Image (cartoon, rainbow, N blue to C red):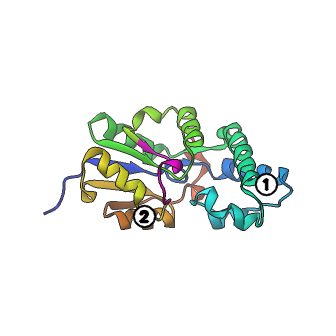
Amino acid sequence: MKKIIKCFIFDLDGTLVDTYKANFIAYKKAFGIAGVKFDQEQYKQFFGQRFDEWASKVMPGKDEKEYKKIKKNKSRFYIENARMCILNNSLVTFLEYVNKIGYFTCLTTTASQKNAEGILRYFKIKKLFDYMVFGEDVNQPKPSPECFYLCFKKFGLEPEECIVFEDSEVGFEAAVNSGAQLIKIKNVNQRVGGLARKP
């Protein structure tokens, strides 16, 4: 028997907001301060993954203190670059609609709470979510489905009652593994800049 949809779950980076440029420049500056070259090919390779998973591959052999310093600097530069981000107008309009008519809405992101909330506040869309899962809320990041399980549990829903919107391969895998329905969003980096919405 087909389940009735009750919840919509959205990824942030690359799905709701094109944060690619802001993120890349922030990482490049942060690694640069540490004397490490960081280019777009490296960033593309690790896009959608949590910093803690790949930092040692870019800068091997360093201690935890040095990684934390890069992460802290990156966070500061990222928020300063918020104006470089582009909102996915079509998807946000849909989010506004389903939120208004009573569906549950969730955000699941590998980003830290500080970084994610900074972007949500910048575009004034934080209030559209009933529940949010950030990178530090899970033990296993995507492609683990843990973040989606937290959403199901929060509202007492079956996976089939939820639709996930994702743009990355790790996100697709996580959604499929969770048992939820999946809608693949074309990576916003490939879109025309005219989709930008002013905050």
| Residue 129 spot, x, y in % from top left | 40, 38
Q: Is residue 98 above or below residue 142?
A: above
Going by the numbered disc 1, the residue's amino acid type is: Phe
* Range covered by the magenta-colored residues: 132-141
Position of residue 150 in the picture relative to residue 159 (left or right): right
Going by the numbered disc 2, the residue's amino acid type is: Ala
SS of the residue under disc 1: helix
Q: Which mark is residue 31?
A: 1
Which residue is located at x 42 percent, y 64 percent? 174
* Residues at marks 1 and 2 touching, judged by CB atoms closer than 8 Å: no
Position of residue 197 in the picture relative to residue 171 (left or right): right
| Residue 61 spot, x, y in % from top left | 77, 66
Q: Is residue 92 magenta?
A: no
Q: Quadrant where the N terminus lies?
A: bottom left
Q: Is residue 142 above or below residue 138?
A: below
Q: Which mark is residue 174?
A: 2
Say whether disc 1 or disc 2 marks the residue closer to the N-terminus.
1
> Which picture quadrant has residue 106?
top left
